[in-house]
Amino acid sequence: MKFKAIILGLILAASTITVYSQSKLSLGFEAGLNIANTNQTPSTSFGSKTGFIIGAVLDAPITPSFSIAPGLRFITKGNSYSGADGTASNTASVIEIDALMKAKFPLTEIKPYVFAGPSLGFILSASYTETPTGGTSTTSDKSANTETIDFGLMFGGGLDFKLTPTMDLFGQFGYSLGLSNIQKNNPAQTTKTTGIQMTAGLRFKL
């Protein structure tokens, strides 16, 4: 009898969450910058490179304070070098799927939130561009030496600003920490992506 009561309680809770989530779904579109870099072992003289982000995210509330926020984004990653001998950069074009959990702090017109969760990136292309001082820029394809998967973690926070009853403006700041080595065919070196991300966009209630 007790077991049946537990099962019934779980079913009711799941039903309540599903109904609440479906009634409060929102879809957001975002764009912004990714100050990309890499953690390399052994370390190199390469530094950050500014890329861009564009994508969409679905907000599916579980409770008024917590929600699941899966997202799909196109993002450029990499690193860069600048010295007396010239400049160089590595660039990767990535389709990234995020599965984030959000904790919200609902106020009145402004709603702060924090988020964290895993991300799975599919590297579409990778290239290396080099420009010697006084010379001509050349670009080479590095896809053969780059893994196709970039797994990592995302965490950060943001603010929702209520514009209308069905539309919010949001801005957020996040950090991406790569956990997988994207360097291929080079056992002497590991390369993991990082990124400081700043985006803004609009969120619409469905």
Image (cartoon, grey):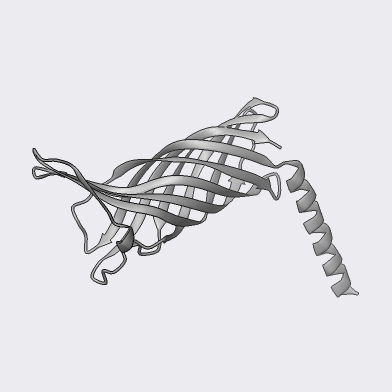
User: Residue 32 at what x, y percent from top left?
Assistant: 44, 36
Residue in view at x 76 percent, y 52 percent: 17
State the residue in front, 42 or 89: 89
Horizontal arrangement in the rendering, residue 168 relative to residue 178 (left or right): right
Question: Considering the image in quadrants, where does the C terminus appear?
Answer: top right
In what quadrant of the picture does the N terminus appear? bottom right
Drawn side of residue 120 relative to residue 169, left or right: left
Q: Position of residue 119 (x, y in %)?
A: 49, 56
The relative height of residue 45 versus residue 145 in the rendered view (above or below) is: above
Residue 149 lies, with reference to residue 100, above or below; the image says below
Near-viewer residue (185 or 25)? 185
Q: Nearer the viewer, residue 34 or 12?
A: 34
Q: Is residue 4 left or right of residue 162?
A: right
Residue under the point 52% across and 41% down: 55
* 32 vs 113, nearest the viewer: 32
- In percent of width and height, residue 142 lies at 29, 57
Q: Is residue 1 above or below residue 44?
A: below
Q: At x 37% / y 53%, what residue is drawn?
A: 125
